[in-house]
Image (cartoon, helix red, strand yellow):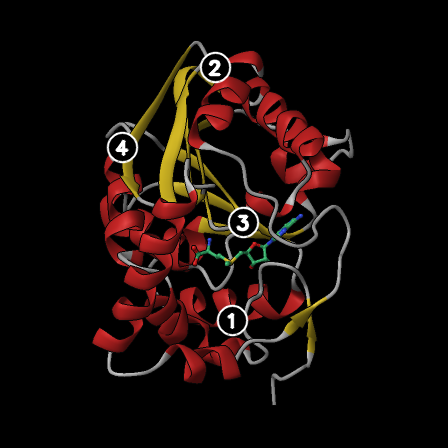
Amino acid sequence: MNQSTTIYPGEVFADTKVFDQRIRQLVPHYDFMLDTLVACIPPKASRILDLGCGTGELSCKLFKQFPDAKIVAVDYSPRMIEMAKYKLGKSEFKENITFVQADFGAWADGEIIEELRESFDACVSSLAIHHLTDEMKYKLLACVAKNLVEGSCFWNADPVIQESAQLQEIYLNLREKWTTNQGTTIQEVRSNMGISEPQGYSGQDRLGTLESHLNMLSSAGFKNVANPWRFLGLAIFGGWV
Ligand SMILES: C[S@@+](CC[C@H](N)C(=O)[O-])C[C@H]1O[C@@H](n2cnc3c(N)ncnc32)[C@H](O)[C@@H]1O
C-alpha cells in the first residue's frame, strides 16, 4: 500500500494512487493548463527536461505531442517517481524517458547531476517550483537558462498570488465550484491530502505575483519573457533564452 501520512511538499495527497484523479478535481482547468503549456513548445524540441514530474502527467502529454522526444523527468519523491515509472513503463515511450530522483533545488545550488549535464531544447514544470524560496527560484531559473540551447524556451505552470483580496476570494469560490462540478466536494478532496513537512529545498507554498515571476525570469537570463495563459490564481509563465 503506497500510503504515508507525512508527505513531501508537492506530493499533495497521502496516497499517490489518487493523485491523477484528485488533482483534476482540485486544480481548475488542470488538463487545459498542461495542454496549453505543451502547445507553447516549438515543434522541433527533441530533448526536454520536466522538473517536478510527479506521476508523469505532463511528460505523458509531451509524448503525445512529441513522440520521438527524449525526456528527462526529475522529482525528489520516490513515491511519485515510482508511479510515473509504472505508468510510462507500460507505454510505447518507455525507452524515451529517463527518471532522475533528485531535488531540483540542489541542482540549482550546484550539485552535479549526470543526466542534467547536456543541454535541453525545452524545459517545463507544473505545480512544483512554487515550493522553493524566491532565492532558490531565481537560482533554478538561472540554472535552467544556462542549460537550454540558444533560442529554446522554459514554461512553468504554477499558482500565483492574486493582485487583490477580492480576486483571491473570487478564485477560491470558483475553485470550490470547479470541484463540485467534478462530482465531489472540496472536503472530500481535502480528506485525501497528506500533511507535508519541509523536504530538501522545498517547503510550503511560496507564491509570487505574475509580475514578480516575469521580472525574475528576465534577471535570471531569459531574453524574452511571456505569460501565455492565466486563470485567476494559476498561470503559465516563462520565456526564451
Ligand atoms: C503537485 S505535483 C505536480 C506534478 C506534475 N508536474 C503535474 O503537474 O501533475 C509537484 C511535484 O513536484 C515535486 N517537487 C516539489 N519540490 C521538489 C524539489 N525541490 N525537487 C524535486 N521535485 C520536487 C513533488 O514531489 C511533486 O511530485
What residue sits right under mark 4 in the picture? 40
Drawn side of residue 192 relative to residue 136, left or right:
left
Q: Quadrant of the N terminus?
A: bottom right
Q: Secondary structure at mark 3?
A: loop
Amino acid bearing label 4:
Cys
Please report the residue visible at 61 percent of the width from the left and 21 percent of the height from the top.
Answer: 142
Figure disc tally: 4
Amino acid bearing label 2:
Phe
What residue sits right under mark 3 in the picture? 128
The span from disc 1 to disc 3 (Cα, nearest Å) is 17 Å
What residue sits right under mark 2 in the picture? 222
The span from disc 3 to disc 2 (Cα, nearest Å) is 20 Å
Q: Residue 137: image x %, image y %?
A: 63, 32
- Which sits in the foreground, 93 or 240? 240
Q: Residue 13: image x %, image y %?
A: 54, 74
- Which sits in the foreground, 218 or 71? 218
- Identify the mark nearer the N-term, 2 or 4: 4
Please report the residue visible at 51 percent of the width from the left and 25 percent of the height from the top.
Answer: 212
Q: Does ligand 1 reach within 8 Å of label 2's beta carbon?
A: no
Q: Quadrant of the C terminus?
A: top left
Q: Is residue 90 visible?
A: no
